[in-house]
Image (cartoon, rainbow, N blue to C red):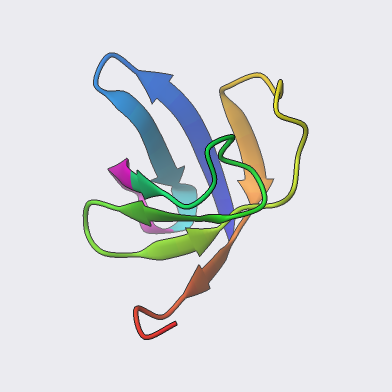
Amino acid sequence: MRVMIRRTSAGLSAYVPKKDLEEPIVEIEKEDLWGGAVTLRNGWRLVLPDLPRDTRLPITVEARKISNED
């Protein structure tokens, strides 16, 4: 699914246009964000693509939603 990642005054945020959903990112699996999973405040876990550490935000990427059991 397409997800826009951006930095807000409160931290990182993810926007999913198809669902018209914007949620703060509350947990990051990898320190540099890219190539790991992130958890949104609503409980969704998304796997982000492996991008360079210095990738500028905001950016729209193709992410994969995973179940909470993983």
Number of numbered discs overlaid on the protein picture: 0
Left or right: where does residue 36 sit relative to residue 9?
A: right
Residue found 64% across the figure and 43% down from its top: 34
Residue 45 vs 55, above or below: the answer is below
Tell me the residue at 54%/46% (across/down): 30
Viewer-nearest residue: 21 or 48: 48
* Residue, far top: 9
Return the residue found at the far bottom.
69
Using the image, determine if residue 29 lies above or below residue 7: below
Residue displayed at 42% across by 42% down: 15
Left or right: where 67 falls relative to 54: left
Q: Which residue is at a point 44% across and 82% down the rendered structure image?
A: 70
* Image coords of residue 55 (percent x, y): 71, 24
Is residue 54 rendered magenta in the image? no
Looking at the image, residue 34 lies above or below residue 63: above
Instruction: Find the magenta span and give its range.
Output: 19-26
- Where residue 32 sits: x, y (%)? 59, 34
User: Could you tell me what secondary structure mostly forms the magenta stretch?
Assistant: strand
Q: Where in the figure is residue 64, as x and y percent of width and height?
A: 59, 66
The quarter of the displayed image where residue 68 is located: bottom left
